[in-house]
Structures are given as C-alpha cells and as structure tokens.
Image (tube, grey):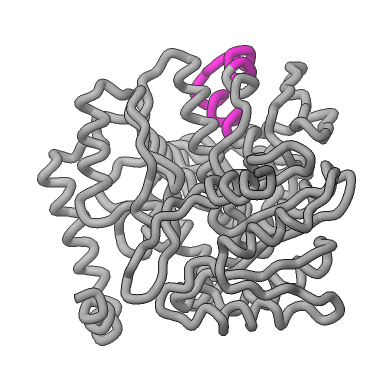
Amino acid sequence: MKKMKAFIKKLAPDFLLNWYHFGWALLGAIIYRFPSKRLKVIGVTGTNGKSTVVFLISRILEEAGYQVAALSSIQFKIKDEVWINNLKMTMPGRLKIQKFLRRAVQAGCRYAILEVTSEGIKQNRHQFINFQTALLTNLTAEHLESHGGFDNYRKAKGRLFQKVGSQGEMIVNLDDQSAGYFLQFPAGRKWGYGLQIRAQAENIVQPENCQLNQKGVSFLVKGINFDLSLLGEFNIANALAAITFGLVEGIPLAKIKLALEKIKGLPGRLEIVIKEPFTVIVDYAHTPDALAKVYQTAGRISKGRLIGVLGAAGGGRDKWKRPQLGQLAEKYLDKVIITNEDPYDEDPQAIIDQLSAGLKQKPAEKILNRRQAIGRALKIAQAGDVVVITGKGCEPWLCVEDGKKIPWDDRQVVREEFSKLRG
C-alpha cells in the first residue's frame, strides 16, 4: 500500500499534489473550527535549533504564568500533558495539527508554539493557521534535492513570514546570511538577535561577555547575567531567540532568566547520557553545519580523545551531504565509526560507503549494525574521552525498508551497552 502511494506521488504533477495537501489543511480547519484564531501562534523555523527554541519559549511563557501548547520534533505538549512525537515527522500532516490546536483551545491555552519545517510548508500544512509571530533560527543547506536548490528552500521558509503580515511580529537571527531576505517581509514589529549582527532590525538583542565552559554558557543581556546549563555557542543563539521572544511579549528579563536557568538540558540535544569514566553525548545533528558545531562543543569538554558514531539518512534525503559529513568526522574526530541511521528503502551499506568517501587520510570503522557500532565506541573509550553519537537524538524509531519502523532510542542503547561493559 505504501509503495503504491509513493508510486502515485511520483506520477502526480506538483500542482495536483499541492491542491491535495491544501484540501486536507482546509478540511482540518473546518472540522476543528479554525482553532488558531483563539490562540497566539508562534512559528519557529530554520535549519537547526528549532526544537530547542520551541522548548525554551515554552518554559519562558510558563514561568510568566501562561498556559502553553507546543509542538516539535521531540514532543507534543498541552499544558502539563506531554507525549513523545513518535510520528517521525516534525510537522504533522492531514488533520493532526488542527486537532492539536483545538485541544489546546479546549485546555485553555493562550499560546501555541509550533516547529515549522520547509517540507511541511511545501505540503501546505501551515495553511489556515493564524500565525502571529514568525521566528528564524538560522538557514544552512538542507532538503536541497527535495526543494530543487537552496533558493527554493529559503523561499519555502519565507512563506511562513508572508503569513504573519503587517499585523504580526518577526524575530530573525541577524548573524545569518539570509537575515536580509526575511526582514524584507512586512510585519508590525521586526526584532533581531545575534552575536555578530550582520543585518539590521528595528529592535536588536545582542549579548555581552559571552563565556563557554564545560557546564554550559553565560552572557549578559541588558545588564542581566544568564548562566545556562546548555552547552555550545550555538545554544547562546538559541537562548537569545527565546529571550527576544520574551521581550517581544513584554515578559521581564528577570523572569526570562529564572525560566532559562531552571533548564538542565534537552532530550537528545547534546544530552550527556554517561558521565564517568568517559562522557557519552547523544545529539540529533544531521546536517554539516550542526555536526561541526556539535564536534566543536564536544572537543572543548574532552580531556582525551573524541570518538564519533555517525551515519546519514536514506530515502533520497540530501545525498550531497554524505561525503561532507565524512569530511567533518575526519577533521574533528580521533576515532570515526560509521554506521546505519535511517536507511528507508536505500541500501544502508551504500549510504555508509558514500559517507566514508569523505575521509581521505583517516581510517574509519564501518559497522552496519547501529547497536554494535555504539557498543564498539564504548568499548574503546578510555577515561577522559568523549563519545559523540549523532543523527537520531531522542528519536523513537529506526526507519527501514517498506515503511517499517523499529523501536529505537540511542540513549537507551548507550545505557544498555554501557551496562554490559560494567557487568
């Protein structure tokens, strides 16, 4: 059945598929009575950092006393009810988003924060949602084959900003090279944030005295010190995005600080699973930009070697990046283990070979079985080393041929393999 659907999609012209998805979005809005009109909806888009920013904004709003709904690749949340996003889809299709928003209204939520993807926009899943705020985290190469190039990828993201319009608000990462493109769209208020500030907005939030350490990051905003348990410079940018949103909403900086300093980490995002005798980190990074930043951050906390376990998704997803991931592994890692990730209907060994082609000087171990690859990394790790396992984070499935999903959690596999070594 799934193969038949895929075959039909290949044959159907784009305009027909667009109307198909548009029709489902409209039907969902009608069935659930256009729920977003009774919420303040924030759309968070970009290549990396979206789930983190959704999480941080949710905590800030809750600290300020608001009832919040949030949807991301990690989880769904309506007030105190939280459940895992096990759809293997960041932005749900068909009627699911409208149903989610209706449930948020019924629960008394004031805000809904949605992670918005270019693929979701391409399939019109953002239609008939009344976005009041659009936020851009960053924009680097991803989904280029699906969209037909970077310009089309950026235009897809821009459609979220178009929906906000002159009555809404936009928040843009001013460090990003595409900041100017998004700032051209009309909005009632235009806010920006960043460390370097390469573009200008009406209101700018820029930190001072940024510090990185083995426990997190610290910086000043408008004289208020933030000391956060979030690793990596890129998490300063993510925190700034959330802080800027809080300021847009009129939330005092002291309350924003209180909310963010309570956060001790995010699931599957630079999550430290094992601390001693060596460190094991699990992260979702699956693009060249994100992988480089994760390796740089892990390198700062390592007292020994940096050991990496990585792969690349199949299903025709951005094949161009596979050798680039290998190049980054060679550049930053002392020991490279290449393994299976989510092959879908592709030959997993072929994906591994394409990724390993990026390594020219350093040998890599190729271990098809992901559990065995993780076990191998733990076995060779010594005191002071850091093992970094990337690509899946806290995703609950490993996706293989014929649409099958195998229950999976990199973090749990790490714990199980580590217990074997101990025992």
Could you tell me how many numbered marks the image carries? 0
The C terminus: image quadrant:
top right
Task: Using the image as rendered, state which of residue 57 and residue 172 is in the foreground.
Answer: 57
Q: Is residue 207 above or below residue 197?
A: above
Residue at the (67%, 34%) spot, across then down: 204
Q: Residue furthest right?
A: 303
Q: Which residues are magenta?
A: 242-258
Q: Position of residue 234 (x, y in %)?
A: 70, 44
Residue at the (74%, 49%) spot, across then down: 198
Quarter of the image for residue 262 reads: top right
Is residue 230 in sight in this rendering?
Answer: yes
Q: Is residue 315 above or below residue 422?
A: below
Q: Is residue 121 left or right of residue 172?
A: left
Q: Position of residue 135 (x, y in %)?
A: 51, 43
Task: Using the image as rendered, state which of residue 315 and residue 411 is in the foreground.
Answer: 411
Q: Position of residue 226 (x, y in %)?
A: 72, 22
Q: Is residue 86 left or right of residue 147?
A: left
Task: Using the image as rendered, state which of residue 208 and residue 186 is in the foreground.
Answer: 208
Q: Is residue 282 magenta?
A: no
Q: Position of residue 282 (x, y in %)?
A: 62, 48
Q: Residue furthest bottom?
A: 11
